[in-house]
Image (cartoon, coloured by chain):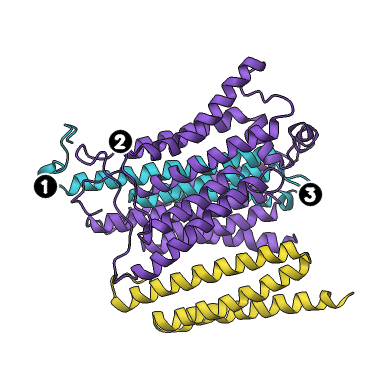
């Protein structure tokens, strides 16, 4: 057992914790703004931890760079969609609630 | 993967599929369908079929999901509320019994076949002669190249079929724009589109190149390209081209044409789709790059829908 | 154990049944299009799952499934365009599509 054998699961569980917190916020918060707040912040941190764990698991620089690129892409997409959804929610362009 | 993981995943796949079918709200149903597609991608990963997982998530969940959302939005603009009429209970029960019976029959048929990797060995033995290492690419572009060639024609034919639904006055105008308005956040989408399209091009080129030896390939790359194009169109960074645009037509036909030309050239050397020894990898990669371009443009335009008359808001 | 190694293809069989049920009971063409996609996904899962070896999956069904996924999306695109065109024609006044000049009135 090397030290990474302990670090990787710790990182994974931390990531999963943030995901769970974000999902809980998505389910429990009242309106679109607070839900987006929970989703965009917590989930991206969670993804960061999982990505870090994956990078350590594969343990090569090439893999780490690729995983970092994936994380950056996800961050960009999440940021843009959150912006657009928040605008939609604010202007109330579509009264389309999911029951 | 462990049994518990597989079991939970299968239950979630069935659950999301049921939600996608049974939800009353059409948007919720489509969102569940996208989740369903992503979970299916995970299932393919669990089966070590990374090539399929990429295609399923990108095309099955991504493109199909966007297509359905777009169709819903356009239908609602036409005044269709997408509410399903209630069916009589006895008909519903009858359908349930019939479908459960059919699923049980299919299940019994499935159980009668032992899962096995029969062709994996023979295909692996043939791979060195192609100079590439991804067996799925080998099957798609060498051992069953005929199927793939025809499939590219199917894709092109589907686009022609979509276009043929346009009213007479619409041709050859471009399809309805997807660009967001200023109020909907046009600036954000435009910046994202301008950033993502070049990145998507690089990513698509990488996916084709790496697809020779590792998971990836023309179809996955084409979808990435289509995704980049669609996001650029939503941001207004790119406009849909007119149907009679010469460059567009070249892009649409390039893949099938290169594939067909190389296939026909093979006749001179022996038989249809014969790759001369020593040139297999070069020819396969050439076909794949042109295919990726054509698939990307075709998918994006299929999603855009038929041309519309200029003053008509889609 | 038979069930364990057939887990994914059996899930595919369930999806085929579910999708067919949705196709029969949902009375809106767009929802039926979604149901057809669920049936397709189930068939892909059967195809791929039965090619599952000890530690690899047969590349041949994998290639078939990739082909199938692409054809399915082409079919969905055409189906969605067809549904929209029908809806447009139905909404047009007097049953004639206002922007239709090439003589194919309903």
Residue at 63% from the left image edge and 30% from the top image edge = B144
Q: Of B109 and C65, which appears nearest the observer?
A: C65
Residue B100 visible in image: no
Residue at 32% from the left image edge and 79% from the top image edge = A90
Whether labels 1 and 3 share one chain: yes
Residue C40 image position (x, y, % from top left): 52, 44
Which residue is label 2 attached to? B164
Q: CA distance from mark 1 to mark 2?
A: 22 Å
Residue B273 image position (x, y, % from top left): 62, 24
Q: Of B7 and B243, which appears nearest the observer?
A: B243
Chain identifier matching the cyan colour in the rendered picture: C
Which residue is label 3 attached to? C55
What kind of element bears circle 2? helix
What kind of element bears circle 3? loop
Chain identifier matching the yellow colour in the rendered picture: A
| Horizontal side, residue A56 vs residue B54: left or right | right
Which residue is label 1 attached to? C93
Q: Chain B appears what colour?
A: purple
Q: Which mark is residue B288?
A: none
Would you place residue B284 above or below residue B192 in this image?
A: above
Question: Which one is in front in this view, the residue at disc 1 or the one at disc 2?
Answer: 2
């Amino acid at each position: 057992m090397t030290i990474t054998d302990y670090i990787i699961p710790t990182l994974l569980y931390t990531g999963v914790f943030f995901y769970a917190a974000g999902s809980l916020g998505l389910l429990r918060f009242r309106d679109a703004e607070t839900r987006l707040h929970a989703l965009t912040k917590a989930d991206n941190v969670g993804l960061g931890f999982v990505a870090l764990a994956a990078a350590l698991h594969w343990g090569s620089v090439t893999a780490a760079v690729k995983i970092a690129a994936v994380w950056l892409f996800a961050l960009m997409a999440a940021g843009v969609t959150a912006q657009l959804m928040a605008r939609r929610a604010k202007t109330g362009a579509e009264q389309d609630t999911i029951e | 993967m462990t049994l518990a993981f597989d079991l939970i995943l299968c239950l979630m796949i069935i659950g999301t599929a049921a939600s996608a079918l049974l939800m009353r709200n059409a948007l919720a149903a489509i969102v569940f369908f996208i989740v369903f597609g992503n979970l299916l991608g995970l299932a393919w990963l669990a089966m070590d079929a990374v090539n399929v997982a990429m295609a399923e998530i990108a095309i099955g969940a991504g493109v199909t999901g966007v297509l359905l959302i777009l169709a819903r939005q356009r239908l609602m603009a036409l005044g269709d509320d997408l509410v399903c009429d209630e069916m009589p209970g006895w008909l519903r029960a009858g359908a349930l019994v019939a479908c459960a019976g059919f699923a049980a029959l299919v299940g019994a048929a499935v159980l009668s076949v032992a899962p096995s990797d029969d062709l994996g060995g023979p295909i692996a033995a043939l791979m060195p002669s192609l100079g590439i290492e991804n067996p799925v690419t080998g099957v798609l572009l060498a051992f069953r190249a005929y199927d793939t060639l025809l499939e590219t024609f199917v894709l092109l034919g589907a686009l022609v079929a979509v276009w043929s639904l346009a009213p007479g006055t619409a041709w050859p105008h471009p399809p309805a724009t997807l660009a967001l308005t200023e109020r909907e956040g046009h600036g954000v989408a435009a910046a994202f589109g301008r950033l993502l399209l070049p990145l998507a091009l690089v990513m698509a080129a990488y996916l084709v190149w790496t697809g020779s030896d590792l998971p990836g390939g023309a179809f996955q790359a084409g979808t990435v390209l289509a995704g980049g194009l669609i996001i650029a169109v939503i941001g207004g960074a790119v406009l849909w081209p007119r149907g009679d645009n010469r460059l567009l037509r070249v892009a649409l036909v390039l893949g099938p044409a290169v594939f067909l030309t190389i296939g026909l050239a093979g006749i001179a050397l022996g038989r249809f789709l014969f790759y001369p020894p020593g040139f297999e990898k070069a020819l396969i990669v050439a076909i794949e790059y042109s295919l990726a371009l054509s698939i990307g443009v075709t998918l994006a335009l299929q999603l855009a829908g038929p041309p519309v008359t200029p003053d008509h808001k889609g | 154990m038979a069930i364990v190694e057939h887990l994914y293809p059996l899930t595919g069989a369930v999806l085929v049944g579910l999708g067919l049920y949705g196709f029969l009971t949902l009375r809106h063409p767009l929802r039926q299009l979604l149901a057809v996609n669920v049936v397709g996904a189930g068939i892909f899962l059967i195809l791929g799952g039965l090619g599952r070896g000890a530690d690899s999956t047969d590349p041949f069904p994998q290639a078939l499934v990739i082909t199938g996924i692409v054809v399915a999306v082409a079919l969905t695109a055409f189906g969605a365009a067809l549904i929209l065109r029908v809806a447009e024609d139905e909404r047009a006044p007097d049953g004639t599509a206002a922007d239709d000049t090439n003589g194919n009135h309903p």
